[in-house]
Amino acid sequence: MESLFGDQDFLDKNSGNNFADIILPVPIPRMFTYRIPSALKSEIQIGLRVIVQFGKKKVLTGIIGKVHNKPPQAYDAKPILDILDSEPSVNPLQIRFWVWMAEYYFCHIGEVMFAALPSGLRLSSESKIQVNPNFDPDTSKYPLDIREEKILEALENQAELSYEDCEKILGIKTIHPIIKSLVAKEAILIFEKVQDKYTPKVETRIRLVPEIAKDKNALQAVFEAVQGKPKQESILLKFLRDIPVFQRPELNEKGLDKATLLEEGDSESSLKTLIKNGVFESFKQIVNRIEEVEAERKAYALSSSQQAAFDEIKGHFETKQTVLLHGVTGSGKTEIYIQLIEEVIDSGSQVLLLLPEIALTTQIVGRLKQVFGSKMGVFHSKYSDNERVEVWNGVLSGRFPFVVGVRSSIFLPFDSLGLVIIDEEHEPSNKQFDPAPRFHARDAAIMLAYFHQAKTLLGSATPSFESYSNASQGKYGYVSLDHRFGDATLPEFHLANLSADRKKNLLKLDSTRLLREKIQQALDQQQQVLIFQNRRGYSPYVQCEDCGWTGQCVQCDVSLTYHQFAEELRCHYCGYKEKIPQSCPACGSTQLSLEGMGTERIEESLSLLFPEARLGRMDLDTTRNKHGYQRILDEFAAGQIDILVGTQMITKGLDFGNVSVVGIWDGDRILNFPDFRSGERAFQQITQVAGRAGRREVKGQVIIQSRKPENEVFENIIRGDYLEYFRQEMMDRKKYYYPPYVKLIKITTRHTDFKTAEKAAHALHHQMAKIPIKKIVLGPEKGVIARIKNQYQLESLIKLEKSGVTQSVFKENLTRIIEELQAVPDFRSVRWVVDVDPS
Ligand code: ADP
Ligand code: ZN
Ligand code: ZN
């Protein structure tokens, strides 16, 4: 019964906050307000996991995002049912970051939570049932049938039952109808049982029993006892080799991992006998999955120009949050990072270094490991969930004051970041395309640093236009390093004219005479060669010479790509595959030919042109398994490969001393990126690949093959004139309203029926037109790929002026518009995907 004065909680102003906003794993773009019962008040903290009732019949687990004193307007707040943790799972800075991300990137906070928590920490739930405490069988309006009564009987003995338990009790397969009926009769409640999915790694360890470990005579007796039993003797000897029990008794204490003890093929059953006979004992221990590595070297002393850059960076940090370090390839940026990182962790703060696809940059990780050893956590994209949880916990416990990671490492539970470094800040892969949140790791990291009052350092040899223009307007500090470390010089460029060579009959298997000559020279001098082929939009496909038929994916509007290795045609978007047809499915002709030129074809051509050379190839297909990438790199480093052909993968962060020639197989393709950023990307890509050549004593040579070598982009790249290039491109960006002059938002409308998708997209445009702000709306147009996985896609592009107010007005209206459209019966299954700052 409520008191005359209403709920005590409402009156009790002094004891702090009465309401909490909870982040729930539901696809609704907001948090939900619940009442904090007095009994829980002293324990309530942001970041704790709690249990709440959601809707009429569901119990959910969520995270407290905010505590406050404002009762919700539209509904009566229900009470929080219980608190799950004694310590918060996430800290208030993380929640603030999630809230910002959901707002800025226009997604649900539940989606951010989902991306942020490693699945090992996620709230995995299993539905269970319990008796509804308000249910009274004697007064209930609804009589129960026999089976329903049986379930209730079982619930008298057990507080909760899983669906599976119920199925067993009744001996039937489909329990849902019965549960549904019980819920409708208000006899039971459904709730979600939360479990931690993380499982610690447990090792079995073996040690000598203490009586033997302490007593040489006892050990002697054991040896006598195993005489004539060579298998047992061998295990004993191996153990004593690894663990000198008498000199180092503490090692026996810790024991030897069983797998190590048996690694030389000793028999497990003999070990069992030794344990049974009281020689060894075995015990279990929780161990780290991420192995400890000790630091091997001190940071290098900086050269005078590196030192000057270092000092300048720190100078800018006095007044600015963010600094752009524009340093040519091989200028020694990494060594500068190392010095900065050392300073910050010595002062007790945390550091995050973001790298694109860390698996692809094992070299740099190795270099950092040498200096930072076990203080450094690595957050891979190929890590297992359990490994991710260990990095997460390592950040929480202080084991890793420094983390190197891919873009999702911005979600780790840092509580006192001092510095965030984003290496290769221009990389397109910093942007997450799918699923939501579609964030840009650089921009999000700058925001994260801001919440921590930390500094941000952006590093690149070819800065993004966004960052460079921020620097030139003075928003960021700017520091440049314009020559390579040591005696290394920047490479020399050559343009090789494909059309001219074709006319003169000098072209062989699509390679120009100049490229062949340079490769031959390198081979003659035992130097290495990298051949780069841009993957994007350029894959080999099979075409009928008679009717023009090409293999198309059955679910997507794209041509299938030819894979020689498996003799297959594959779709790169959905994974669909089929065998190569013997004859044309359309006209029956057997004249099927291969068009386009992938890395696989180039490798083949080169092996014909340079039969003595040892070839290697690095692309998605050769690096699919976990160690593929590392293996190829190791072979290349060991000089077992003379010519390495590869995609974008060979451009990132590779630092090999013996590469003298870099060939760009098809320079024109790089320019044909269907996007306003094509020029910027071409400049970045060619400069990055070229940057792999001549990084030590040998001079580097870069050969760009092109049909139109007179293109002025090449001119600027060759002169290394970033600034001039930037100026020219920025004029176009301004004229045609593109970033960084405007803010872009892309909205994709998706549906399986083209007419419906089209109607929905037009309805969206109609509504957006009414939003009272200055904007340009383009489209709707068919997407670059009109259909993916059977969903038609129409794209709309919105250009907004760069003001915070404009953007928030637009986003608020967009939320409402999409909600309203979703309520239209025809559009119920239409999906709208919003991408802020698409790249
Ligand atoms: P960037 O990251 O700018 O491309 P790196 O940091 O990879 O350049 O440096 C290029 C090469 O020069 C690397 O092999 C690196 O080990 C070496 N190097 C850079 N700075 C120093 C230094 N201060 N002392 C010794 N070697 C250095
Ligand atoms: Zn045909
Ligand atoms: Zn497909």
Image: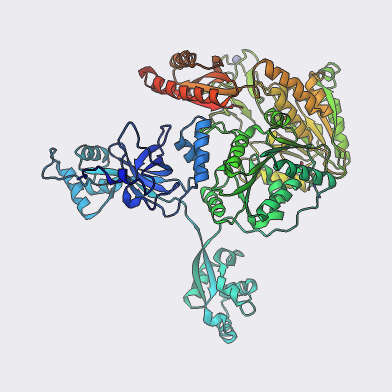
Q: Is residue 564 above or below residue 589?
A: below
Res 208 quadrant in image:
bottom right
Q: Is residue 168 above or below residue 282?
A: above
Ligand 2: give its quadrant: top right
Q: Can residue 388 be seen?
A: yes
* Residue 532 shown left or right of residue 281 in the figure: right
Q: Is residue 647 above or below residue 212?
A: above
Res 734 quadrant in image:
top right
In the rendered image, residue 450, in percent from the top left (x then y), is placed at: 60, 40
**Identity of the residue drawn at 41% across and 46% down:** 124
Q: Can residue 381 be seen?
A: no
Q: Quadrant of the C terminus?
A: top right
In the rendered image, residue 58, in percent from the top left (x then y), is placed at: 31, 40
In the rendered image, residue 423, in percent from the top left (x then y), is placed at: 69, 40
Give the residue at the far left of this rendering.
138
**Identity of the residue drawn at 86% across and 45% down:** 486
Colouring of the image: rainbow
In the rendered image, residue 520, in percent from the top left (x then y), is placed at: 86, 35
**Identity of the residue drawn at 53% across and 67% down:** 205
Total labels: the figure holds 0
**Identity of the residue drawn at 69% across and 53% down:** 369
Instruction: Name the foreground residue: 199 vs 441.
Output: 441
Res 237 quadrant in image:
bottom right
